[in-house]
Amino acid sequence: MSVKAVKKTQKKSRKEQEKVFEEMWTHPMKKPYLEKVVLNIGVGAGGEELERAFTVLQTISDKTPVKTLSKKNVKEFNLRIGRPIGTMVTIRRKEAEKLLKRLFVVNNDKMLRKSFDNYGNFGFGITEHITIPGIEYDNLIGIWGLDVVGRIVRPGLRVKYRRKGRAKVPKHHYVSRAEAQYFLEKNFGIEIVDKLELEYM
């Protein structure tokens, strides 16, 4: 399936568009996959608060997070270059898929249509980490919100980031917004909506 044919599907019906994606995915170099999921909590300062946020991400991901450092001097917020201001953790491939399914439950398996870009990236926020299945409230930790960002890619994207022999990746090799949405709908049972209406138990 050519790139021009894929672009023309933007004006076609949804079923026709999905058929184009399915045909394209029969090619091993065109079949997308979830590369990674990144969880991030911005604290704004170090100390005990940052350690609590660190523990939250460690509990959710079962991985060891890293601390993010300030890249700018901002006098109003008492920020200095190199000062810890947050924490993040990256989960890849199969483990990322399992975690993402848990995280989607928080939003009733729904995602906003505007939460995607044309390069395979998507993201959403979680206001209370204790709403994630398997996470219990700890009064010593409190309640934290976090950002969730994922990336869907095709095989071969590594040439853009490898140390030797780097090369540009043509735009048509990235996963488009519509394709990323269909990928999540098919593989994770997600419903793409224009507005989130969450139900609290």
Image (tube, rainbow, N blue to C red):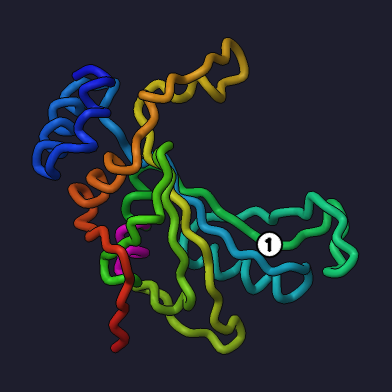
**Residue 92 location, quadrant:** top left
Give x and y (percent) for residue 8.
22, 29
Q: Is residue 101 magenta?
A: yes
Residue ID for mark 1: 86
Residue 110 locus on image (x, y percent): 28, 64
Q: Residues within 10 Å of mark 1 (few under 14, many from 20)?
A: many
Q: Main secondary structure of the magenta part?
A: helix
Residue extending furthest toward the top: 165
Q: Locate the N terminus and report the quarter of the image it occupies.
A: top left
Which residue is drawn at the image coordinates 78% and 72% (left, top)? 47
User: Relative to 8, is 120 on the left or the right?
Assistant: right
Q: 108 above or below 72?
A: below
The residue segment tinted magenta is 100-105
Pick whichever, 68 or 15, lies toward us: 15
User: Which quarter of the picture shows residue 80?
Assistant: bottom right
Tell me what residue is drawn at x 39 percent, y 72 percent. Answer: 132
Q: Is residue 65 left or right of residue 108?
A: right
Q: Tell me where residue 42 appears, x and y as whole percent.
A: 65, 65
Q: Residue furthest front?
A: 11
Q: Position of residue 121 (x, y in %)?
A: 43, 44
Residue pushed farthest right?
Answer: 75
- Which residue is found at the position 59% from the left and 69% from the top? 55
Q: Is residue 146 left or right of residue 110?
A: right
